Amino acid sequence: MPTKRFQDLQVYQLSENLADEIWQIVNTWKPLAQDTVGKQIVRSADSIGANIAEGVGRGSYQENKRFVKIARGSLNETQHWLRRAYKRQLLTLEQTQSIKTIINELAPKLNSYLKSIGNISQTNNK
């Protein structure tokens, strides 16, 4: 399996941007909101990049794909918590739009990355 540094992957960089933006927002919330929705959303957003990194480090296409699928699940969980935060008036419309912009770029790239894992070597082996 060719190894690429996970830090160089655009999908990883986008996941970092998402997690950092969410962290900055949650850091301004009151303690109750931070302790409930805040902890959940930060953990799920951080999990996206962590799973991409772990998948790259596993050394096999199957394991990498498995962890990218987990990252995709964490992205969906993050979207759930964003909906809850917005509904509870913890996020402004501007914050929501900014986060949505990142998610709208990240989600399809995560799916494309998943589909691409292993395809280069399969083509080269034919």
Image (tube, rainbow, N blue to C red):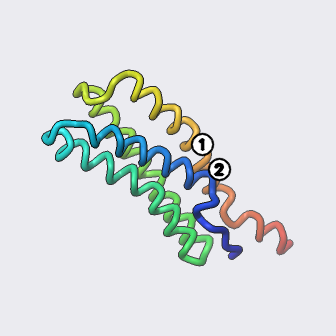
Q: Position of residue 48 (x, y in %)?
A: 45, 54
Q: Secondary structure at mark 1?
A: helix
Quadrant (top left, top right, bottom left, bottom right) of the N terminus: bottom right
Question: In the picture shown, does residue 29 fall above or below 69?
Answer: above
Residues at badges 1 and 2 in contact (C-beta under 8 Å)? yes
Residue 101 percent coordinates (x, y): 52, 32
* Residue behind mark 2: 112
Does residue 29 sit above or below 112 in this rendering?
Answer: above
SS category of the residue bearing label 2: helix
Q: Quadrant of residue 124?
A: bottom right
Task: Residue at 52%, 38% (x, y): give it.
Answer: 102
In-front residue for pair 113/96: 96
Q: Residues within 10 Å of mark 1 (few under 14, many from 20)?
A: few
* Disc 2 packing (10 Å; few <14; some 14–19; many ≥20): few
Tell me which residue sits at (46%, 44%) in the image. 18
Q: Residue 51 versus residue 10: which sits nearer the camera?
A: 10
Amino acid at circle 2 = Ser
Residue 113 falls left or right of residue 43: right
Query: Hey, which residue is sitting farthest top in the picture?
Result: 93
Residue placed under numbered mark 1 in the picture? 108
* Residue 65 in which image quadrant: bottom right
Amino acid at dot 1: Pro
* Residue 28 spot, x, y in % from top left: 26, 37
Quadrant occupied by the C terminus: bottom right
Q: Residue at x 77, y 70 (%)?
A: 121
* Separation of residues labelled 1 and 2 (CA atoms): 6 Å
| Picture coordinates of residue 6, whole percent (x, y) | 59, 64
